Image: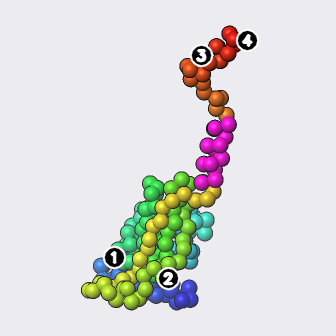
Amino acid sequence: MDDEIIKNKVKEIFTEYLTLHKHRKTPERYAILDHIYSTKGHFDMDSLYNSMIEENFRVSRATLYNTIDLLLECGLVVKHQFGENVSKYERAYGNENHNHIICTSCGRVWETKNGDLFTPTQQKKIKKFTVHYYSMYIYGICSKCSHAKKMELHRLSQAQPEKTTGADKKQKKSKKNES
């Protein structure tokens, strides 16, 4: 779907939600929505705040948090907790279903498409439920962290002096005395 069509649709959905729930329709809320739907990928509140400041749009953190709550409630933003202490968000409307692959060592997150995972036929089997989106989290260790861990273990094994037991010391001493 075209980005402008998506932006217009989410603005329409957000306006309907704000009207229905008697919330104010402020330029700041719409600017935040537009900014989120102008970028792809995950973001946290700090990165959203900083990127809006970089674009010379002054908005308070309170307005950001309140607007994100509204966007979560009306289903235009999805919240993720990838095992960190920081919540990540991403746009929900017009976003393809996908998996999240999370490295438990460095925290990096990758997205992969999962088109064959949950087919429309499988979705129809769920009675009295309309699927809007779905996501899967796959946790593991990325190749970069795995390699770094192996190198660290190798380095540590090379740096450690050979340990000798009491029996080894007696054998060495008796061999010395035999000579």
Where's residue 111, x and y in %? 54, 71
User: Which of the two labelled residues, at mark 4 and mark 1, occupies the earlier sequence position?
Assistant: 1
Q: Residue at x 60, y 27 (%)?
A: 163
Label 4, label 2: how many angstroms apart (C-alpha)?
Answer: 76 Å
Label 3, label 1: how many angstroms apart (C-alpha)?
Answer: 84 Å
**Residue 107 falls inside the magenta stretch:** no
In the rendered view, tell whether residue 167 sits above or below residue 89: above
Tell me whether circle 4 and circle 2 mark residues in contact (CB < 8 Å): no
List the residue tagged with mark 1. 23
Q: Mark 2 Cα within 10 Å, few/some/many (few <14, many 20+)?
A: few
Res 131 → quadrant: bottom left
Identify which amino acid the numbered label 4 is placed on.
Ser
Q: Main secondary structure of the magenta part?
A: helix
Identify which amino acid the numbered label 3 is placed on.
Lys
84 with respect to 40 (left or right): left
User: Which of the two labelled residues, at mark 2 and mark 1, occupies the earlier sequence position?
Assistant: 1
Marking on residue 179: 4
Q: Nearer the viewer, residue 147 or 111?
A: 147
Tag 4 secondary structure: loop
List the residue tagged with mark 3. 170
Q: Residue at x 61, y 59 (%)?
A: 143
